[in-house]
Amino acid sequence: MQLSLAHNLTERVIERELTRRYPNHRKVFRVIGRVERIVGASYLSIALSARHVRQWQENERLARQLGYK
């Protein structure tokens, strides 16, 4: 969560600075910023869920090995 917050804050600062320097491209910078935040959040979500999926698979394997399934 802290990594995501820091990433989003940094991205917003960069977006604001680019908008200040190039005011005619404000909409482009906003769209790119939003896309980048969505991609970052999606990556973090997948990375965190992968560990849970591996644990579930290991639990299933162990349950079969011990005769519970």
Image: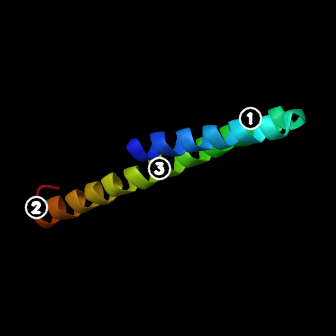
Q: Amino acid at mark 2?
A: Gly
Give the labeled residue for mark 3. Answer: 44
Frontmost of labels 1 and 2 is 1
Q: Residue at x 47, y 49 (%)?
A: 44
Q: Is 58 in front, or is 31? A: 31
Quarter of the image with the N terminus in it: top left
Q: Residue at x 12, y 55 (%)?
A: 68
Q: Which mark is residue 30?
A: 1
Q: Residue at x 86, y 37 (%)?
A: 25
As helix, strand or loop, the secondary structure at mark 2 comes to: loop
As helix, strand or loop, the secondary structure at mark 3 comes to: helix
Q: Is residue 62 left or right of residue 8?
A: left
Task: Measure the C-alpha gap from mark 2 to mark 3.
Answer: 35 Å
Query: Dot 3 surroundings within 10 Å: few (below 14), some, or many (20 or more)?
Result: some
Q: Is 40 in front, or is 21? A: 21
First-in-chain label (1 vs 2): 1
Query: Dot 1 surroundings within 10 Å: few (below 14), some, or many (20 or more)?
Result: some
Q: Mark 1–mark 2 contact, CB under 8 Å?
A: no
Q: Is residue 45 above or below residue 30?
A: below
Frontmost of labels 3 and 1 is 1
Quarter of the image with the C terminus in it: bottom left
Residue 45 place in picture, x, y as percent: 46, 46
Give the labeled residue for mark 2. Answer: 67
